[in-house]
Image: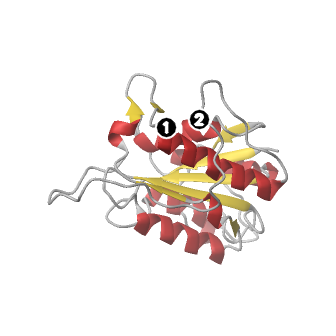
Amino acid sequence: MRLLALSGSLRARSSNGAVLRSALAFWDGPTATADIGALPHFNPDLDGEDATPTAPVAALRAQVTTADALLIVSPEYAHGVPGVLKNALDWLVSSGECVSKPVAVITASPSPTGGDHANAQLREILRMMTGEVIQAACREIPAIGPKIDPTTERVTDEATLSELRAALSHLAAATGTAASEPESGPAATSEPAATPAAAPAATTAAPRPS
């Protein structure tokens, strides 16, 4: 089963990129990550039946079409979905590639809320697109900074890795495949639903999202 991942952050050393790469290690099958940064701004005039999509748009649609499931990993910007990710989803609305496609949404943030606003908004957008949001595969990861090794750019926190494996297991079950256990990975978890991990109390300064 083929998994396509979309990252809501374009930063070279994004913490959400680290979460995405760590999560993909639990998927037992081919994976790919879409290059949504190359997409043009969405324009309805370029999205009609008579319009010819640009190469990046056509490539994204083809990737989504051939994927058996989608994994979206994103930061939260100003209590919302990053513009680059919303732009990518806008290009998929009328063309219908997301219809009935199993989707997992994971947000990670340095804040104690784990990007809950963006997570809820993404799930609502995807439901409107008639994607099959797998609720048990959705996660909100708070206080992400110290949970990542800056050298390997991978998640090292065992509790977070366990949550990622559980999320991918639920997504895999929705596509009829099974999540794998990477070398030195955490033990399997039987928890069926997402519960944000405990986080330190919020501070007055807004953390920098990534």
Of residues 186 and 143, which is closer to you in this image? Answer: 186
Question: Measured from the top left, where is residue 32 in percent x and y?
Answer: 68, 39
Instruction: Tell me the quarter of the picture where residue 127 sits.
Output: bottom right
Which residue is the extreme one toward the bottom? Answer: 128
Instruction: Tell me the quarter of the picture where residue 28 sits.
Output: top right
Whether residue 57 is visible: no
Q: Residues within 10 Å of mark 2 (few under 14, many from 20)?
A: some
Picture residue at 71% right of the left edge, 74% below the top? 130
Q: Mark 1 and 2 residues: CB-CB less than 8 Å, in contact?
A: yes
Question: In the rendered image, which quarter contains the N terminus?
Answer: top right
Distance between mark 1 and mark 2 Cα atoms: 6 Å
Q: Secondary structure at mark 1?
A: helix
Q: Residues within 10 Å of mark 1 (few under 14, many from 20)?
A: few
Q: Secondary structure at mark 2?
A: loop
Q: Which mark is residue 158?
A: 1
Question: Measured from the top left, where is residue 51 in percent x and y?
Answer: 71, 65
In the image, what residue type sits under mark 2?
Answer: Pro
Question: Measured from the top left, where is residue 107 in percent x and y?
Answer: 47, 55
Picture residue at 44% right of the left edge, 47% below the top? 9
From the image, tell me which residue sits under label 2.
186
